[in-house]
Image: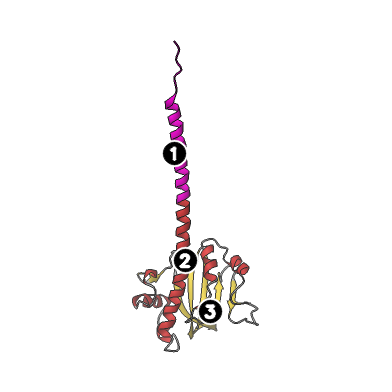
Amino acid sequence: MFRYKNNQDGATMLETLGVLTIVIMLGISSIKLIGNIMAMFKQSMVVSEIQDLQKAITDRYKFEGSYKSLFEGRSDEDIVQYLCENKIAPFQMCSGDRMYHRMGGAVWVVPSGYYEDDVFVADYNKYAMTFYKLTDKTCLLAAQINWNKQKTSSIFKMIINSDKVNKLVVDVPYNMQTGSKTFPADVSDITKACSYDDNNTIEWVFF
């Protein structure tokens, strides 16, 4: 008598492939989710580093009335090294004699000032803090920090991508001579300025 042979092996193979496909898709989704979460965490950490570094510098020198003792006689490299060696900068930002934010870009702190006959004249009443190589999303978040909530901050100016076409200069208060925008800047202006993928730069100038 002819008997029908049930192909259990074939069914089992198809089921296994189906399960493996689902597992692989879930794995890919999980990796993307974890990647997104890590990116958001790093963005948040960069914002915290910006605020912590500014507060540490201002708190250290506000009783002196200026930043002269920090800057005078020191090169840009020496200033960064000094901030790290004296534990003024957040420890996680320091690597040797350099500073880097959580996204890996360099961080510099220099005296503010102006050029007179091609000679830089330092203004020790202000300092500039610059974060390089920010992603577009991190740039957008960092540019929208509400410095009014930072009791120690006295922001003077913010410059996004000073060397690029879509640069944005934000003065506090509104500068009638340059026609720059009142701080804080409009989100659409910030979004346009922070449009250089992973290569955005923001400079803040503080009293």
Query: Tags 2 and 3 in contact by the CB under 8 Å rule?
Result: no
Considering only order in the chain, which callout, 1 or 2, is on the residue closer to the N terminus?
1
Q: Position of residue 93 (x, y in %)?
A: 39, 69
The residue that mark 3 highlights is 148
> Magenta includes 28?
yes
User: Which of the 4 image quarters holds residue 65?
Assistant: bottom left
Secondary structure category for the residue under label 3: helix
Q: Residue at x 44, y 82 (%)?
A: 58
Considering only order in the chain, which callout, 3 or 2, is on the residue closer to the N terminus?
2
Residue 11 lies left or right of residue 144; in this view the side is left
Q: Nearer the viewer, residue 17 or 46?
A: 17
Magenta-highlighted stretch: main secondary structure?
helix
**Can residue 157 be seen from the camera position used here?**
yes
Pointer 2: residues within 10 angstroms few (<14), some, or many (20+)?
some
Residue type, label 2? Ser
- 7, above or below 109, in the image: above
Q: Which residues are magenta?
A: 1-30
Q: Quote the CA–CA distance across marks 1 and 3.
A: 53 Å
**Can residue 72 be seen from the camera position used here?**
no
Q: Nearer the viewer, residue 66 or 186?
A: 186
Q: Position of residue 21 (x, y in %)?
A: 47, 39
Of marks 2 and 1, the one in the foreground? 1
Secondary structure category for the residue under label 2: helix
Residue 117 lies left or right of residue 6; in this view the side is right
The residue that mark 2 highlights is 44
Q: Quote the CA–CA distance across marks 2 and 3.
A: 19 Å
Residue type, label 3? Asn
The residue that mark 1 highlights is 20
Residue type, label 1? Leu
Farthest-out residue, top: 1
Q: Position of residue 106 (x, y in %)?
A: 44, 68
